Image (cartoon, rainbow, N blue to C red):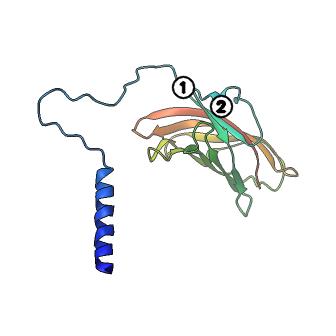
Amino acid sequence: MTRIYHIALFSFAVSFFISCKKEYSYEGGLPVQNDTIINNNTTPYICPSCIGADNFIEGKWSMYNGSAFYCGIIDTAIAAPARNGFTVFGPSACSLDSGLVLTINTEPVLLNQDVINSTTSKAGMYYYDNVAQTYPFMTQSGYQFTVSIESYIHQTKMMTATFSGIVVRAGGGQTSVQGKFKVKVH
């Protein structure tokens, strides 16, 4: 009886996984109609949640790529134990499956004191897309990318900063991004 149960369960699982796959086949005859819609709209999409978000808002990030605008929250902002750098990241306001990650080395400046107008090029950034399993924007060595700490108040841990530079697109090629964030770095 157990053997029959296992065979039935295996048959069901195999048929289930095979039936879920969308397949295309063309054996001749009438032309196949593609189910993909091609959008030739050149106007950049701006998520409704990002309208008015191009300001320094605590716990938020925003970024431009040309006229395209992205924004989101920062759900994590942590300093390195030696306080010689930090990482901030958080999802996009438009899709929780995408978001921004920035890692910054501030040496020789340490985040154990107030910091005003300090710029570093020792930084990495990527914008991720978990649906497409890609990084639409990612820094790479050899391309200029900087982070400027406009202010960091050590007592409150509040930081206001901007970032800009050249990034590589998922499909290849280079583009520029400019952004900002305001967050408490713990």
Return the residue nearer the eye: 13 or 73: 13
* Residue 181 in sight in this render: yes
144 is higher (above) or lower (below) than 39: below
Question: Crowding at label 2, few (<14), some or many (≥20) Cα neighbours within 10 Å?
Answer: few
Return the residue nearer the eye: 121 or 133: 133
Label 2 element class: helix
Label 1 element class: loop
Residue at x-position 66% and y-position 42%: 147
Return the residue nearer the eye: 180 or 151: 180
Q: Name the residue under label 2.
A: 49
Q: Name the residue under label 1.
A: 45
Q: Position of residue 114 (x, y in %)?
A: 84, 48
* Residue 149 in sight in this render: no
Residue at x-position 33% and y-position 68%: 9
Residue at x-position 63% and y-position 38%: 93
Type of amino acid under label 2: Ser
